[in-house]
Structure formats: C-alpha cells, structure tokens
Image: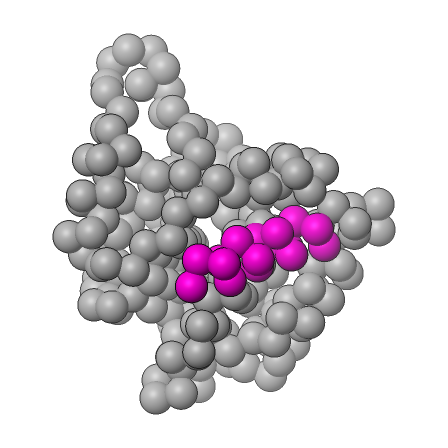
Amino acid sequence: MTSNTRNTTVINIAITGVGGQGVLTLAEILAKSALEDSHNVRVGEIHGMAQRGGHVVCTVRIGENAKGPIIDPGTAHLVVGFEPVETLREIHLISKGGLVIMNSHVQYPVVVSMGKAEYPSKEEIHDALTMHTAKIIEFNAIELANNAGNSLSMNIVMLGAILASGIVPIKKETALHVVQTTFPSKFVDVNTKAFELGYQAISDSL
C-alpha cells in the first residue's frame, strides 16, 4: 500500500485488546521504532486495566504536531484490534476512510465464559465495524504466531501487519531491528518470523 501520510502531519494509531496479549509492548515498540527513524511520537494508555483479561487501549501518535497522546473519536488513521469485540469497542475512534487491522481469533470475556453474557456473532461484529469504515483487514494472528513458534509473539505479528499497511512513516528494517534488540536473543528467530508473517499477511490482502 502506498503511504497516505504525505499530506498529514500526525498519524493516529489506536491499539486495543485485553491484558496479556501484548498491547502495551506493541505500542512501546512502535514508539521506539518511530523515534529511531527520527519522528516525534506520543504514546498513551487511554483507559482500561492491563491485568490479564482486562480491556486495554493504547494510542500512538506520530508526527511533528503530535503534542499529546489523546486520539479524538473519528481521527484514527489505523485501529489495530487484537480481538474482535475489543476492536468493536474502539471503532468509534476510526476516521472516515481509516483502516482496521483485526485479529479474528476470539478470546471470550469472563462474563461470557460464565454464561452471564453473549458474545456477538461474527456477522454482527462485521456489520457494526463496516458502519464506520469499509477498510477492514481480518486475519488469524494467533495462528501466524503459532506458526512462528510462540503464540505470545502475536503482538509482533501485528507489528509486521502495521508496517505492511504503509500508514506509519517507519521503515520496515527499523521496526525489525527494534524487535530484535528489545527481547532476549533466544527470541530473535521467533519474533523475526512472526514479524514477517504479519507483514506478508497484510501485503497479500492489499
């Protein structure tokens, strides 16, 4: 995809999921990569709890006019969802024509597992998302992470997907270098493969 950042001084990215999926780590790596490529960046956790199973939302704003971490509703160029319902929770942030990259693998909330609530159908989620944007790429990031060798590398799969979208002004090699130097060396091969699988998945969908 050709980058759509040329006429914009700030790129707004919202990343949403549940605690334990690596949402915070992805936001940090994305910010480090932006800094390494000499971009101004602001990162924030908007709301939610980062404990395992709790709703988590992080924002990353990249560009010379990014003065704070808050993303107003309708201004996100990219919403990255680690789980379908969690993506739906934050779809109000997406801008007109913005892109959604969503992991299709369902992680049921505790209330659903306990039988106290119902999880919406795939069709219901899709219909609700398309009310906000027609640009939705959905793929099974957990499956790709497992193919890379570790389900915990799903956030790195999502990082590769973000870079492949062309929306962020970060070089692929910069992001990959940050990944390879952030984690212990024993994870380099798994994370590199996870990144490439995520990158290819989005490249094939564009």
In the figure, 86 relative to 61: above or below? above
Q: Nearer the viewer, residue 202 or 156?
A: 202
| Residue 191 on image: x %, y % | 70, 50
Residue 131 seen anywhere in this rendered image of the structure: yes
Residue 59 seen anywhere in this rendered image of the structure: no
Q: Nearer the viewer, residue 7 or 60?
A: 7
**Residue at left offset 27%, top offset 33%:** 122
| Residue 185 on image: x %, y % | 84, 51
Residue 169 horizontal side relative to residue 111, left or right: right
Query: Mainly helix, strand or loop, the magenta region?
Result: helix
In the figure, 199 relative to 11: above or below? above
| Residue 53 on image: x %, y % | 45, 30
| Residue 195 on image: x %, y % | 64, 55
**Residue at left offset 66%, top offset 38%:** 147
Magenta-span inclusion, residue 68 = no
**Residue at left offset 61%, top offset 52%:** 197
Give the farthest residue toward the top.
115
Which residues are drawn in magenta?
192-206
The image quarter in which residue 176 lies: bottom right
Position of the C terminus by quadrant: bottom left
Give the farthest residue toward the bottom.
7
In the figure, 49 relative to 96: above or below? above
**Residue at left offset 37%, top offset 20%:** 110
Residue 29 horizontal side relative to residue 79, left or right: right
